[in-house]
Structure formats: C-alpha cells, structure tokens
Image (spheres, rainbow, N blue to C red):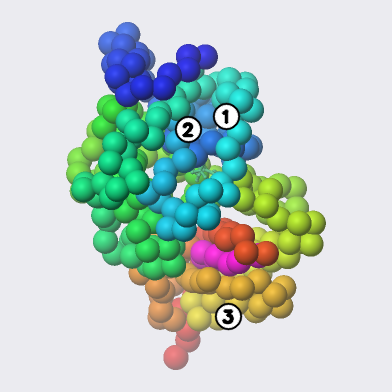
Amino acid sequence: MEQLGDIKSWRRYADEQRARGRDVALVPTMGALHDGHASLFRAAKQSGAVVIATLFVNPRQFGDAADLKAYPRTPHEDAVVAKENGVDCLVEPSLVEMWPDYPEATPTTVSVHGIGDVLEGAERPGHFDGVASVVTKLFSITGLCRAYFGEKDFQQVAVVRQMVRDLALPVQIVGCPIVRDPDGLAISSRNDLLSVEGRAQALALSRSLRSLSPADPASAQRRRLRDVLEAAGVEIAYAEIVEPTTFKACRDDESGPRRALVAGLVEGVRLIDNAPVTLVAQAH
Ligand code: AMP
C-alpha cells in the first residue's frame, strides 16, 4: 500500500492509474477506522478499481471545538485496517494544504441548500458546508472516480449526490449499507466514548427504527420512533420521516418508500441512525 501526504503526489497517483486504464475509487474518511469504513474499502476493491482512501479530520465540519478535540485519532492502526481491507493508496493530507487559511475562515464554501438545511444541517449549523467544501476538494484532487459513502450518514450521501449533480463533478457516488454491531448499534467512532450503560441506552436508536410498522402513515411512524427513544431516556435531537432525495418531511397523505432518521444525545455523545420505511397514507 502506498502512503501519501501531499496533494501533488495524490493527484499524480490518480492520474497515473487512469493512464494505465484503471478505474479509480475514492473512500473519504476521518480515520479511527472500524468495520463500517472497512466495508467501504472492500466494496470499492470488489468493483475492480484502484482504491484511494483519505484520512482527514476536517475541522470545517465540526461546529464545536471540544467535539473536534475529542475526535479519536488512531493513524497507526488505521494504516493496518486500510491495508488489510484492500486500500491501494492511503492519503493523509495536511491541514495546511487542505485549508491554508485555517484557523481563519476559508473564503470559499460549497453550500447545498434545502437538503443541507434540515435535520443534521439544522442541528449543526455549518456542518454540511464543511462536508460539501472538503468533499469538493477531495474530488477536485482525485479527478474522475467513483466515490464510496456509507448510508450511516444518509443525509450526507444525499447532500453529496445533489452537489455532484449541480456542479457536474466527474464522480459517481456509491452509497453502501450501514454496518452494525451484533446488538444492532450502528458502528461509529463515537461509540467508543460511551460507558457500558450508555451503550445499552444507545441501542434505543436502532430499536426505534425496528419498531416502525410497514403500514402506518408518517405521523404514527414518527410517534413510534419518539416513544422508543423517550422510554430509554435518550435526549432526542430529531426523529423524522423524509422523502429520501429531497429530505422533505412526509405528510400523512403520502404512501410508499421513505427514510426514517433519528439523532440523539447519550452521555453527551451525539449518535445518529436511519432505516428505510414504507408509509401507508392515512385513510379519510
Ligand atoms: P467518517 O470517518 O465518520 O467521516 O466516515 C467515513 C465514511 O464511512 C462515511 O461515508 C460514513 O458514512 C462511513 N461509515 C461510517 N460508519 C459506518 C457504518 N457503521 N456503516 C457504513 N458506513 C459507515
């Protein structure tokens, strides 16, 4: 596995692979790699492409300095996980190359309105601007590629897809399923911050999604989510049913496949989860 740290050699690596006729796959991460990330590496590898993974804890997508500081960093272990799961080139770009003006504000920002303004966007102002800006830069450096993202961050995938469409970026977005621990908890680097009791409480997120019925209107589904989360004492950030591409909140006269998304605080740790749900319109 190659390990690179500067933009010039990263761009050259991708160019050379394409010149040799290889497809390029990009897997952006913030490191502290776990089985969720590994599943993206393996999916990218299985597609036959040469796999470039990036490790960059992007300060622009953290609203809160303490959250950024607490974010786990395990670069040595990450290199092992990447290598064992098919990554051909691991890139760890420097902060000074990615955001030369940091900690001053970067003058250039990519914003995706609508999808990026609700749920996570409303709860964490500026978060998706940070995500869209850094992903645009990763795409600009890598060039023509397929990029793999986890549905664990379902809204993030929708924001990135919209941005790729609007800016005609030469990137095909591939969404990959959520990887869960055997007890149902969606794997996240943040789970390590929970105590044993906190982890048990956190299971309410996936349990709330499993409580959804295949035959209820939106408001009844929302109530199910909230009931399970409240019973477990989770501090709810949101529990919503949305149209999966526009992220418009669903009404009770809608039927068909939609997405349920939940977010909450457990022991001060912000957790998210989501699942597909089918709505049946309320009978009049
Ligand atoms: P992060 O390092 O948290 O920015 O995540 C990097 C990528 O891994 C994102 O596309 C995430 O959606 C994805 N990811 C994180 N956790 C999981 C998981 N449990 N299952 C699937 N993908 C995941």
* Relative to 122, residue 23 above or below: above
Q: Position of residue 270 (x, y in %)?
A: 57, 61
- Disc 1 or 2, which lies upstream in sequence? 2
Can residue 47 be found in the magenta stretch?
Answer: no
Q: Which residue is mark 3?
A: 223
Q: Nearer the viewer, mark 3 or mark 2?
A: 2
Q: Which residue is mark 2?
A: 55
Residue at point 29% right, 36% down?
100
> Marks 2 and 1: in contact by CB < 8 Å?
yes
Q: Which residue is mark 1?
A: 75
Residue at point 53% right, 55% down?
66
What residue type is disc 2 on? Leu
Q: Is residue 207 left or right of residue 243?
A: right
Residue at point 73% right, 61% down?
198
Q: Residues within 10 Å of mark 3 (few under 14, many from 20)?
A: some
Q: Position of residue 218 (x, y in %)?
A: 49, 77
- Disc 3 or 1, which lies upstream in sequence? 1
What residue type is disc 1 on? Pro
Of all residues, the one furthest to the top in this rendering is 20
Asked whether residue 154 is in view, the answer is no
